[in-house]
Image (spheres, grey):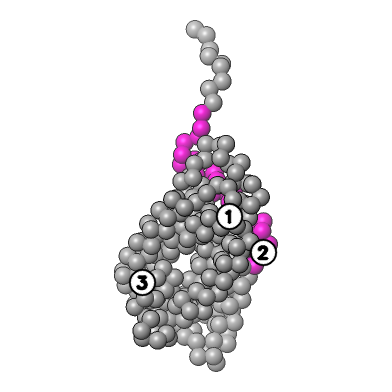
Amino acid sequence: MSLDLSPAPAAAPRARRIVNHARIEVAMLVRNGEQLILNLVIPVGLLVGGLLFGGRLGLEVATFPASVMALALWSTGFTSLAINTGFERRQGILERLVATPLSKADLIAGKALATASVAAGQLVLLGVVAGLLGWRPAPTWPQTLAALTGAALAVMAFAGLALTLAGRLRAEAVLGLANLVYIVVAAGGAVVLPVSAYPAVVQPMLRLLPFGALGELLRGWAGGTASGWPVLVLAAWAALCLLLARKAFRWMS
């Protein structure tokens, strides 16, 4: 009986391709100093400042850490991912991936998984810092499960929006537009401030938007009043945005 030593090249299983690509994406993100500032330093600075001085500024200190968590997920899931992917397209990095077994759906899944992994690290870090400063949320276990599910769905929705934007526009346009949208949503999208702080006429719309739903869900979790409605909103947005990204994303500029 003879051994067959002839080469038999084959692509890795799809799940392994996605996980391997996600691992590479996380490593690249960790090495990017600008993204670390946006995703870690700024949220931690806001958190510390809010907990120490927020009471004097009229902030709801009991739920402010949850608002910072929502803002961190928004910056990571949308702004960072959109900018990074836009410049990867311009530099031809994504064009080279066309010759690999990695499909468009694999790329989107890998980037979304990497973003979710970084987001999970953000939540843990912010939770530890807030706890050291005396923050004590009061959720039930079902509310915690709903918050974690909603956070994961929100990151998927934000990633879909980011990849749609980065997959259609030039890198410079993505850079400017992503930063502009980040600021507008942070200021007026019910991410940092509760929906009740906005005029009554826009409150229903804010609750139906992914960033508003995420902010309300996490603040409700921190205060022990979270409901399942924001999770349903975020599930719908996640499905819609990922589908849109798959249809609109292009490898090359």
Gap in Å between the C-alphas at discs 2 and 3? 31 Å
Q: What stretch is highlighted in magenta?
A: 10-37
Q: Nearer the viewer, residue 30 or 101?
A: 101
In the image as oriented, which residue stretches furthest toward the top? Answer: 1
Image side of residue 67 versus residue 175, left or right? left
x and y percentages locating residue 195 in the rendered image: 40, 81
Q: Earlier in the sequence, mark 2 or mark 3?
A: 2
Q: What residue type is labelled 2?
A: Glu
Q: Count the marks: how many?
A: 3
Residue 212 % position (x, y): 42, 73
Look at discs 2 and 3 and give the one toward the viewer.
3
Q: Disc 2 designates what residue? A: 34
Return the x and y of residue 4 as percentages of the image width and height: 53, 14
Residue matched to label 3:
208
Contact, mark 2 vs mark 3 (Cβ under 8 Å) = no
**Residue 236 in view:** yes
Q: What element carries label 2?
A: helix
Distance CA(mark 3)–CA(mark 1): 27 Å
Q: What residue type is labelled 3?
A: Leu
Q: Residues within 10 Å of mark 3 (few under 14, many from 20)?
A: some
Residue 247 sits inside the magenta stretch: no
- Mostly what secondary structure, the magenta segment? helix
Q: Quadrant of residue 170?
A: bottom right
Identify the residue position indicated by label 1 in the image.
85
Q: Which of marks 3 and 1 is nearer the N terminus?
A: 1
Name the element at disc 3. helix
Q: Quadrant of residue 79?
A: bottom right
The amino acid sitting under disc 1 is: Thr
